[in-house]
Image: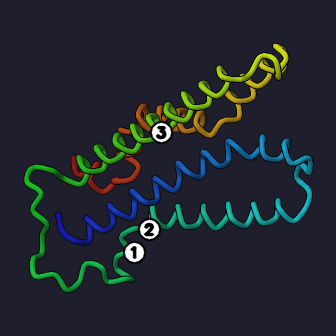
Amino acid sequence: MNFRDFFALVFKLVGLYQLTGLVTMLMGIPSILVGSGFGLMGYGSMALIIIIAVQVLVIYLFLFKAHQIVGFLKLDKGFDAKEINLGSLDARSLLRASIIILATYFIVNGLIGSLTQFGNYVNLDPSLVSPETKRTTLLQTLLSSYSTYNIIVGVALWYLHEKLVNILSPDVSEEN
């Protein structure tokens, strides 16, 4: 693997991580808007739209224009060797392993958060909280928790990892 491909792979992985963060953020927006009471009105929503637009642009550049970024920044210049020797690992194998590790990270992180929230729910003092409020709290915790969204994103990444590898490395998949 040459340095240009290696740095492009790093940019693609950072872009994929940003994409999963964007998906998690987008899944949480309805609960934020409902909880704030402002809905889609106000300055906050305009800032949110700008943040999402910039993040989508960065994700697009990192995922689909990684080689151009490496060339523009000249990251592949100035090395003594022309290739990185990784043994039998190729770019597709590294990308596949990285996506699986990222998916596992999201699932484990989500499970830890969910278990913590469930522990907090179980430890609610019954004398201070009515049974109806306790049921509603559990439902809200499960439906609006970033931990739940992280688990969903992690499972989706795990399930779709091969398709993502084909999308993010089309030049390699065309050779095979």
* Residue indicated by mark 2: 65
Between disc 2 and disc 3, the foreground one is 3
Residue reaching furthest front? Answer: 127
* Residue indicated by mark 1: 68
Tell me the SS state at disc 2: loop
* Residue indicated by mark 3: 109
Which residue is drawn at the image coordinates 47% and 39% (left, top)? Answer: 109
* Front residue of this view, candidates 155 and 117: 117
- Placement of the N terminus among the 4 image quadrants: bottom left
Which residue is drawn at the image coordinates 23% and 46% (left, top)? Answer: 93
Total labels: the figure holds: 3
Q: Are marks 1 and 2 in contact (CB under 8 Å)?
A: yes
Q: Residue 90 in the image: x percent, y percent?
A: 18, 52
- How much space separates mark 2 and mark 3, taking CA atoms? 30 Å
Mark 3: amino acid: Asn
Tell me the SS state at disc 3: helix
Q: Earlier in the sequence, mark 2 or mark 3?
A: 2
